[in-house]
Image (cartoon, helix red, strand yellow):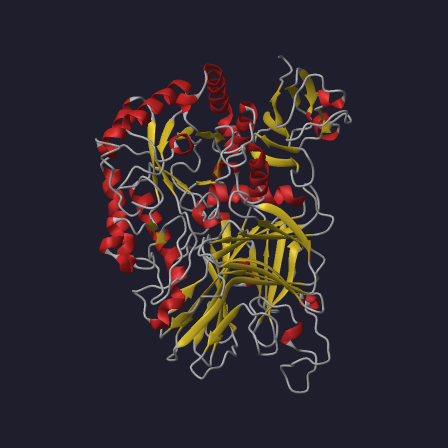
Amino acid sequence: MAACCSTKHSGVNMPEAHRRSRKQTAVYHQSTQTFHLYNETLSYIIKVLPSGHLGQLYYGKRIHDRDNFDHLFETSPRPMSSCSYEGDLTFSLEHIKQEYPVYGSGDLRHPAIDITQENGSHILNFEYVNHQIIQGKPQLDHLPATYVEKEDEAQTLIITLYDDVIDTKLQLSYTIYHDLPVITRNAFIINEGKQKLRLNQMMSMSLDLPDQDYEMIELTGSWARERSIKTRKLTEGIQSIYSLRGCSSHQFNPFIALKRENCKETSGEVLGFSLVYSGNFLAQVEVDNYHVSRVSMGIHPHCFEYLLDHLDSFQSPEVVMVYSNQGLNKMSQTYHQLYQKRLARGKYRDQVRPILVNNWEGTYFDFNEDKIVSMANTAKELGIELFVLDDGWFGNRNNDHQGLGDWFPNLDKLPHGIRGLSKRIHDLGLKFGLWFEPEMVNEDSNLYRNHPEWILKTPHRKSCHGRNQYILDFSNHEVVEYIAKAMMNVIDDSYISYIKWDMNRCMSEVYSSTHDVSSQGRVMHEYILGVYHLYDVLTTKYPDILFESCASGGARFDPGMLYYAPQCWTSDDTDAIERLKIQYGTSLVYPLSSMGSHVSAIPNHQTFRNTPLETRANVAYFGTFGYELDVNQLTFEEKEIIKKQISFMKQYRSLFQFGTFYRLKSPFTSNETAWMVVSHDKTQAIVGYYRPLQEVNVGYRRLPLLGLDEDKMYHVNGLDLYGDELMNVGLIISDSSCGENKDGIGDYYSKLYILKEKKENE
């Protein structure tokens, strides 16, 4: 059922009594033209202003619904303001909190949308026309987004605005989940007039908050040190993160949070904003000189330009807004739950993931069929379930300079092709996985020699390479279809259960030979749409294959990718100690089931650390788990340890991957890291404790836990302890470092604590 109301155009009005007779989370109060989205946790209140624009009244902890919230709408005369009405010095859009602002019609702050009209003007005026309240959540065309499985999980408010001068409709969509503190937002525009319009900017959302008393959290980094947690206090001006690299990037993740200064992991208020998109983005907070904080998020306007002819339209990606008044842990757990169950899709969404070994760091390009089969045979003996053949199996690929784009087996290495190799591994009782890099090409390849026009390259300009490779023009449907067929030829002919999809360079010199001059501003967005299309084609045709996304590690670790691939290569950094920060930061938004995490060889290939095998596993358990090394180079002792690790992971992987995750100690603030995962029935928990550098003669240590049942008795460390004691007093984690350390524990220490409920009769 849908509720609709209109001021300019006719609509269907649902009677007040009927509207309130059923459970609702989206309510429209016609007498005051006010919308209230609410559930048990949050409230979001907007209203139609006297000017027809949308005003923002409140976003925060749930408050009681009422017909009239007009007292929250504040106006006052202020000097130097641009006022909307003759004789009225109070109504100025510059000082009114809005939902989707434009520039120049009174408001001189950064807009949510910018359009160049045929006369050169940028002035816009989108006014309320009507709205609908519908059960459930509509899908977005050609874009990833969160979803519902039943209509009663959510309600969606769609508000239609119209600019009469340019005959253009703008629709703002708000979905509120009944049982989660989540509101999702997106925007859609269609040109219903005769003018040719140039869309220069279209944010997915904008939100004006009444004060600046927030700290902005972002996830920053670079290759091999992704998603470090950075916090800065808001101040006047603009604070932003972004990507112009053609992917969501190693440098910044498409996520920000605004927290109150007193907000910690388990207490205080925080607002999270996460963009479901894998390309260029902008996340920005503008604080004006009256302390209003304008949050906006969406596709970055640089190198973005869409010409909208008659009936042409554009759909923005989705932003997922999460509210928590119980600290950062609660915000993270909400994202984990939503992204795990209502963003990820397919067979493996709810299934534990196979324990894999990837040959890359074990062999690089130097392998043949017998060597791979020998490694697979050893892997089977260790208890590994999936063998993944990485880069180097195709074309003339023997180094970084050649072969990309030629997706047919290198018969010099694999005389029986992928079919023969995969069958041999399948016959061992292992699943087989394969590496692809579908979006890239080397100059030394048949594909490039036949179709040099298929790469992104600006005419008459030098082209940069990355890893000696170039980027295929995925905004060209012909290219996408060619790659799809090439991949299908390999998959259809083989025994493949897993695909690692890599992408090893960012975009430069972006220009498409198939787009005309007026369409070059579409290329970067349409490239990502091409990537999504190929993912959709392959995941639809092969529902039993587990896809793992990768972009030189974590350059596209974002919600958009999770919609198609339920797990992602978290980072190319394989050092367990560095991974503490990477996985800790990643957990701010993304669930453990999405994090590809492996035990690697030592000395580590990047840091040359000799981290104990136990610690490498203790970090990797908190993810999908696997190995990235040559299993044939292991000693007997190492093999025995790995057998036990694999057995342990098989016993507890459901808990690791689908339990409730809590952060306990941050690697960004101390020499210790701690986190834990708790089963949904709170009968089991596993605590991970890590200390990279050994200390001497320090104080005794206690670690307060979280998420347990205070009335349950837990067996841990040979003791039977109640949950309330473990959470309020803490787990005793003191060791020999509290004295002279004669036990010689040393650096890179870690320990797992297994908690199991002890029944009264046990």
Q: Picture coordinates of residue 537 (x, y %)?
A: 31, 48
| Residue under the point 71% across and 65% down | 291
| Residue under the point 33% across and 55% down | 472
Q: Report if residue 65 is visible in the image.
A: no
State the residue in front, 179 or 485. Answer: 485
- The quarter of the picture where the C terminus appears is top right
State the residue in front, 123 or 227. Answer: 227
| Residue under the point 70% across and 26% down | 726
State the residue in front, 488 or 148. Answer: 488
Is residue 755 left or right of 521 when viewed as pictured? right
Is residue 86 left or right of 12 when viewed as pictured? right
Is residue 244 left or right of 660 when viewed as pictured? left
Up-down relation of residue 121 to residue 748 (above or below):
below
Q: Picture coordinates of residue 87 (x, y %)?
A: 68, 87
Q: Picture coordinates of residue 643 (x, y %)?
A: 46, 18
Q: Report if residue 228 is visible in the image.
A: yes
Up-down relation of residue 42 to residue 677 (above or below):
below
Which residue sits furthest bottom?
A: 86
Up-down relation of residue 721 to residue 77 (above or below):
above
Tally the marks: 0
Is residue 572 left or right of 721 when viewed as pictured? left
Q: Picture coordinates of residue 164 (x, y %)?
A: 47, 79
Up-down relation of residue 513 to residue 23 (above or below):
below
Quadrant hosting residue 390: top left
- The quarter of the picture where the N terminus appears is bottom left
